[in-house]
Each structure stands twice: as C-alpha cells, then as structure tokens.
Image (cartoon, rainbow, N blue to C red):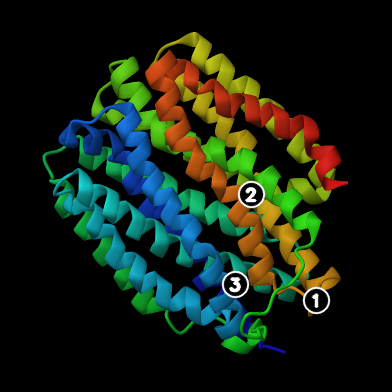
Amino acid sequence: MFKGDEYRKARLATLIAFLINGFSVGNFVSRIPDFKSELGISNGVLGAALLCGSIGVLSALRPASRGAARYGSGPLTKYSAFTLALAVPLVGLLFNLPWFLFSLFIYGVLSSIHDLSMNAHAAALENKAGKRVMSTFHAMWSIGGLTGGAIGGFIASTDIPLRVHALSIGIFIFGIALITRNWFLPAVADKHAIEKHEKRKVPRKFLILGLLGLCGALGEGAAADWGGVLARETFHSSALMSALPYVFFSFTMVSGRLSGDFLAHKFGVVKLLTYSGLLAGFGLTGGLLIGNIYGAILGWFLLGIGLSTVIPMAISATGTLANQKYSGQVSAAEGVALVTGVAYFGFVVGPPLIGFLSDLMTLRWAMLVPALLAIIFGLSAKKVLS
C-alpha cells in the first residue's frame, strides 16, 4: 500500500505528463499549415506525410505496453518524457520532405511510448483511488493541446522560425521532465511478469472498446490536422484565425473532460456517449454547411464537446476490466495498449483519408466523414457498452 503523499505526487506527475504530451501536439498542429506551405506540398502529400507519424504511433504501442508491464508504467513515463523532448525539435528542422517524413515517424514513436505509459500509469492510479478519474487526466492533455495550439498560433503569426519554435518547446518539455522525474509511483505499483514469447488470448471486450475509441480518434485527428488548413485555404483566414478552430476544439475538449467523470457517474456512460456522439456529428455537419470561418469554429467547438469523453471512458473501462475481471491474465498496460492501438488506428487512417478525399471532393466536404462516424458511435454506444 502506498502512502497518501506518494499517491498525490504521482497523480500530479501524471497530470503534468498528460499536459506536456498535449502541449507538444498542440504546438505541432498549429504549424501544420506552415509545414505545408514551406514544403510546397498538396493536401494529399501532407496527408501521406502525417500518416508516417501515425504509423510511428502504432508501431510503438506493443513494445511500449510490454515495457510498461515488465518494468512498471511509472519508470517508463519518466524516461519517455525526456525522449519526447528530444523528438520535438527534429520535426521543426524541416530540411526537406524526406526528413519531414522521417522526423514525423520518430516523433510518432516517441510520443506513443510516452502516451501509452502515462495512460497505463493513470489506470494504475485510478485503480488505487477506487473511483473514475481518467477523464480528468485526459482533460489535462486537452489543456496542453489548447495552450500549445494558442501559443503556436500566436508564434505562427510572427517571424519566429519553425526551428526556433520547435527547439524552445523541446527545452521546455525537458525541463518539466527533469522536475517531475522522481514523483511517479514505483515500478512495483503495476509491474506484471511477462514470459518471453508468451501469447495470450485477447478478450473480445477490449477490441469492441477499441472500435468505439477509433470513431472518436479519427474525429480528433481530423479536427487537429485539418482545421487550420481548412480555415487558411478554403476560407482564406489569417494565420491567427486559422488556429482558432483547433483552439476552440481544444477548449471544449477540456471542458468536456473536466466534467466527464462527474457526468458519467450521474447519467451513466451509455447516455453520455450517445448524446455526445450525436452532438459531435450534427454539430460538425452544421458548421461545415455554414461555409465560413465562423461555421468552422462552431463545428469544431461542438465536435470537441462530443468527442471529449470517448477515449477516456474507453481507457477507463479497459483499466477496470484488466484489474478486476482479467487480473493475472492481462495487465492494465497491455489492455490499454490494445484498446488504444485499435482506437489510434483512427489517427492513422484519418489524416491521409481526409487528405485524399479532399483532393477529390474538397476538404470541406471530406470533413463529413468524422461527422458521420461520430453519429455512428453515438447510435451504437448502448450496444457496445452493454
């Protein structure tokens, strides 16, 4: 049993881990239009480039999950924060398109390791607390994304070079990682012995939860990667205005996640996700039909509210199942990796899918895909979670 102070410090460290992960993504997203313009590439090529980052994310999930299970999620979260700090400046160097593809893959790998380990650590803390707190952790990720997007949007409107911007973010994350390095729970909190070449039957429930998360992840990825491009190129907005759809999206993601644990407890997860999906889908559709920057901001605003609790609820349910129903069979880290692996496939297919469709039917109408998926997960939430 761990002491109260030890738990509180670990909880704070994990909240900060979510914050800096989101902060790095927010800054990256805010500069996507600048990556595109500096390299002189089309939406389709940009979508393929973003795919490299998503492939990096997925390729790291299994080894990261086994590492978190074998060595403990706390130590892995600590060390992966330092590697994340080193990965951020790589993308900002932007020497040429091949380098952009390579750096995005590396960033995806290292960001994924940090993401998986901090989610596994959050599941361990939630299990220790004996109550639902996962949505609050994810709210910190959204706060980081909101802050990073706002700062990145401001920097994009100045003459500060991409390289300087990326290096500054990397130094900031490194400093935070240094301060919090000894605050996490020790390895024994959630270590899970894994025999070499051991294979286990995957519980079907985890796959179903992953598919629910996939619908939300595709919407999150599309909103993050294409909001600025839509505003800049379709609605001819300024650099600062182009950052606003993602900023408003991040703001409502924060609000939804801060209240998600309370709402899930009060109304139940099924009702919460049903109405959230419908709001996200129809809200984004309405914003796209308006057809200007203000419609985009409204659509991203409502999409953020609707998608805010999807992945946190899926991961929370996974941790609960692993710790209670499948204890000794599947570790929480492995369960989280499986669900996030399926869910994050939405981040893999989302950016290139939207990019390729935008070349065929314009970016504005391609964004109806995540709207449709949000409606689908809203209508199917009862069946998935029953």
Residue positioned 47% across, 66% down in the render: 113
The quarter of the picture where residue 42 lies is: top left
Image position of 90 with respect to 201: above or below: above
Dot 3 crowding, Cα within 10 Å, few <14, some 14–19, many 20+: many
Check disc 3 and give the amino acid type.
His
Which residue is depicted at the point 79% across and 46% down?
269
Q: Which mark is residue 121?
A: 3
- Label 1: few (<14), some or many (≥20) within 10 Å? few
Between residue 371 and residue 357, name the one nearer to us. Answer: 357
Whichever of callouts 1 and 2 sits on the residue coming sooner in the sequence is 2
Q: Quadrant of the N terminus?
A: bottom right
Helix, strand or loop for disc 2: helix
270 and 111: which one is in front?
Answer: 111
Would you say residue 261 is visible in this rendering? no
| Amino acid of disc 1 | Ser
The residue at which mark 2 appears reads as 311
Amino acid type of the residue that numbered disc 2 sits on in the rendered structure:
Ile
Q: Is residue 217 left or right of residue 361?
A: right
Q: Residue at x 43, y 35 (%)?
A: 352
Please tell me the numbered disc located at residue 7: none
Q: Which residue is mark 1?
A: 327
Closer to the observer: label 1 or label 2?
A: 1
Inspect this view and state whether residue 298 appears: yes
- Image depth: mark 1 or mark 3 in front: 1
Farthest residue in the right direction?
A: 386
| Dot 1 or dot 3, earlier in sequence | 3
On the image, the x and y values in percent for residue 360 come to: 41, 16
